[in-house]
Amino acid sequence: MNVITLYLLLLKATLTSFSGGTSFPSVRQDLVVQRHAVTDAQLSTAVAISRMGPGPNGAFVICLGQYIAGPAGAAAGYLAMITPAWLAIILLRLLQGRTSHPRAQSAIQSLTAAAAGLMLANSWPIAQTAITSWFPALLSALSLAAFLSRNVETVWVLAASGILAMLYSGLHA
Amino acid sequence: MVPWLEFLSEFARAGNLTLGGGQPMIAELERRVISVRHWLPPEDFGLLYSIARLTPGTNILAFVAATAARIQGPFGGVVAVVAASLPAGFVIWLMTIFFDAWSSNRWIAAAMFGAMAAVVGLILSSAWQLLRPFRKKPFAIAIFVAALLAGITNTASPVTILLSAAALGALFPPKQ
């Protein structure tokens, strides 16, 4: 895939999301479902890598860029991640004193609720790839419980799940 | 004007050394820039946070851009976003190459398989965390259910669903 096209597709996803992780449904629709540029497994791996590393959660677009077009693709992913942030500088000038407007607040609320719905809808194909037996199902359930407790760092949950899977793999070799 | 080196190092530190995503980074930046350095008055935080929520894309980077632009002008905002994200982005890129190169290794493959299972839990919990503040608001719940059904049945693209939700929210704000 052309790097410019990749940048524009990832930019479309980041421009229509309102937190790093919520660009995920749009990315999946364009790159997994329509163009078959990456698989659901690669998308999950990208999310896992971005959550294990430093920086914002939306950094999974860098991993996807690397999978699709190598280093140039990773650069396209990075640029797609940071480009929308610069709009905040313009918004700072335009919206001073207006962000508390009920219509603006209501639009943000509705966007957030819709993003939650889309994330849930898109978790199903990912789950089908990742949960192939009782053991990954148990890991998913334990991870969900850990994340909902909000007292643990994401990176530790992912690392613990990875280590448990390695031990399980070793026991069943 | 704040000295550039100190200015950039604060944003680089918060953006690249804080684990756990946007909220911990925003909390760290607020602490350093407002409470410790006093580069901005505390009452600016609400404005900057709202702008970060209104800006598409990654909230933390929008928060960085707005906060830095407020302190150091538009150019400061542009440069601070790069300082807050480039080193972490480079690390993520290296991690991707490493996992890709070692994906055929049995142990690495098992570890990634376990991490992928945890990602399912992560996505479910993220969806719940997003919805949780609005769970007693019928309009937001209706939007959530509509988006969920539209997403499952593929009746519209995610972009269309999100933009429709924003338009509906703006058209029908809650009564004060």
Image (cartoon, rainbow, N blue to C red):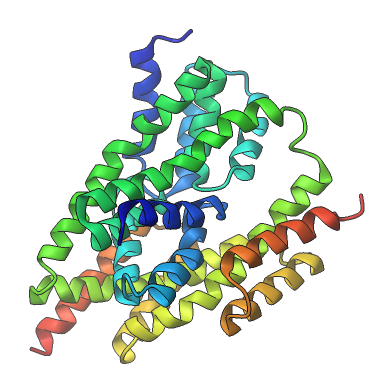
Tell me if residue A150 can be seen: no
- Which percent across, then down, holds residue B104? 10, 74
- Say whether residue A162 is left or right of residue B6: left
- Which percent across, then down, holds residue B19? 36, 47
Counting labels gives: 0
Q: Residue at x 36, y 41 (%)?
A: B18
| Foreground residue among B74 and A129 | B74
Outermost residue toward the right in this view: B175
Quarter occupied by the N terminus of chain A: bottom left
- Say whether residue B6 is left or right of residue A122: left
**Residue B152 falls in image quadrant:** bottom right
Q: Is residue A89 above or below residue B147?
A: above
- Which percent across, then down, holds residue B158? 57, 67
Q: Is residue B28 above or below residue B43?
A: below
- Say whether residue A93 is left or right of residue B83: right
- Which percent across, then down, holds residue A90? 60, 30
| Foreground residue among A88 and B43 | A88
Q: Is residue B66 above or below residue A117?
A: above
Quarter occupied by the C terminus of chain A: bottom left
Q: Is residue B150 above or below residue A20?
A: below
Tell me if residue A105 can be seen: yes
- Say whether residue A31 is left or right of residue B151: left
Q: Residue at x 48, y 25 (%)?
A: B77
Q: Residue at x 29, y 70 (%)?
A: A42
**Residue A168 falls in image quadrant:** bottom left
